Amino acid sequence: MASRPELLAPPEIFYDDTEARKYTSSSRIIDIQSKLSERALELLALPDDGIPRLLLDIGCGSGLSGETLSENGHVWIGLDISQSMLNVALEREVEGDLLLGDMGQGLGLRSGVLDGAISISAVQWLCNADKSSHEPRLRLKAFFGSLYRCLARGARAVFQVYPENIAQRELILSSAMRAGFAGGVVVDYPHSSKSRKEYLVLTCGPPSLSTSVPNGKGEDGENSTDESSGDEENQTVSISDRHRPRKKQKVNKKGKGREWVMKKKEQMRKKGNVVPPDSKYTARKRKSRF
Amino acid sequence: MRLLTHNMLSCNVKGVTNGFPLIIQADKVLEKPAELNHDFLRNMFYKVDWKALVDAAKSMGYSELPESAEASMLESLDFLNRFHHALMELHLEEGALICPETGRKFPVDKGIPNMLLHEDEV
Ligand SMILES: C[S@@+](CC[C@H](N)C(=O)[O-])C[C@H]1O[C@@H](n2cnc3c(N)ncnc32)[C@H](O)[C@@H]1O
């Protein structure tokens, strides 16, 4: 993306008739959005019983993401701030019901009614102040607070987001945590600048087994420095704790970093293994001559 | 917009304590056939506010729902058919949704309710 649309204009202005049409007639965009939606739906981890669920698609746009929900048999309600995008959704005869609304004003839905929510490429818009009356923190708070309320207990919300930078990701994530959500970020293909995708996976209700953050895809190419690390454990950059400094979380090319080693050791301890005590030397980088 | 969605919506204006159910002003109603799914209806039954559904259906010209309902009725195919028709097949195409507390009108155009709030309502 040459420039970020979020920086050009407010969403209801940016997604005008021309842009809405352009967006929805690009086979490349259709392809990307449906893949992102498939993955988000997978991360929602709905019960595998074939029963249609009631889902909310936040920033549904012209219905590309919603279409994936329909194809998987679910019933959905879509919310978007752009009338032009919704008009294209009408033209395409999407199966979901559509609402014209601003997620930053909070969701006007009854408590506990949704079985899940997804949002594809939309939530980062909330980080902008498009009007003098806009305060991103307050809008995020209104959004996450209301979302928490209208999800059924134990239900998940999965957002694929394009945060502009680390501070934005932190802002979004901390707003979610403050609203009571548990969860974190799943990064697919973290080492590819092109296919790297971030998903916020949030669970409504107290932490439990189901609130643990699932794994990212495509870290296999990475040289693992730890033989014992199972496939299912080394793939996700999870930042479920907002107080942790971001820097230390990064899995860099040179090695896994202290944070990761400490986590690993803790896991091994829990399994009952004998693990050397932590010291200031733990996971310290060695000079190359070593 | 289906009555399913109407049954979930409430008025979100600042200060409103009871914004549900929104009163329906039905200028144009459409019926669109939809596939009936027993399991979905069964799950939805526990989420739906029955009285709101009955009143909403009436304001859309459909008065075939029983005034009150209980889970045992889900065994009846006749009941399921009516429930399904009201919840999934009746669409409010043109009209408005009106907040029961403040009278604030949310216009419905081409089936899409405009739930955008004015700045002083947030
Ligand atoms: C990149 S499009 C994605 C649309 C759709 N989810 C898809 O996958 O094709 C982002 C959408 O978010 C919507 N959006 C941005 N800010 C919003 C807000 N505050 N409330 C509701 N929708 C918003 C935009 O209008 C736009 O349709």
Image (cartoon, coloured by chain):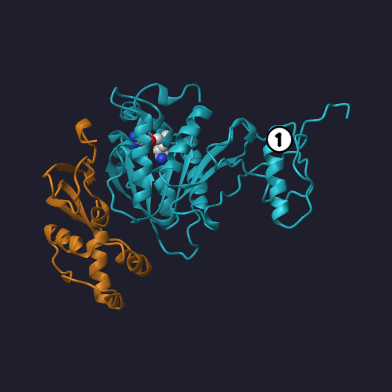
* Closer to the camera in the image, A279 or A189: A279
Chain A: what color?
Answer: cyan
Q: Position of A261 compared to A190: left or right?
A: right
For image coordinates 59% across by 42% down, the residue present is: A238
Taking the image as four quarters, which one is ligand 1 found in?
A: top left
* Screen quadrant of the C terminus of chain A: top right
The residue where tag 1 is placed is A257
For image coordinates 41% across by 22% down, the residue present is: A7
Residue B20: horizontal and vertical position, in percent? 20, 53
Q: Secondary structure at mark 1?
A: helix
The relative height of residue A285 versus residue A199 in the rendered view (above or below) is above
Residue A25 appears in the rendering: no
What subunit carries mark 1? A
Residue A150: horizontal and vertical position, in percent? 34, 51
For image coordinates 20% across by 32% down, the residue present is: B120
Residue B3: horizontal and vertical position, in percent? 23, 56
Tell me the crowding category of disc 1: few under 14, some 14 to 19, or many 20 or more residues within 10 angstroms, Cα based: some
Residue A284 appears in the rendering: yes
Q: Amino acid at mark 1?
A: Gly
Chain B: what color?
Answer: orange
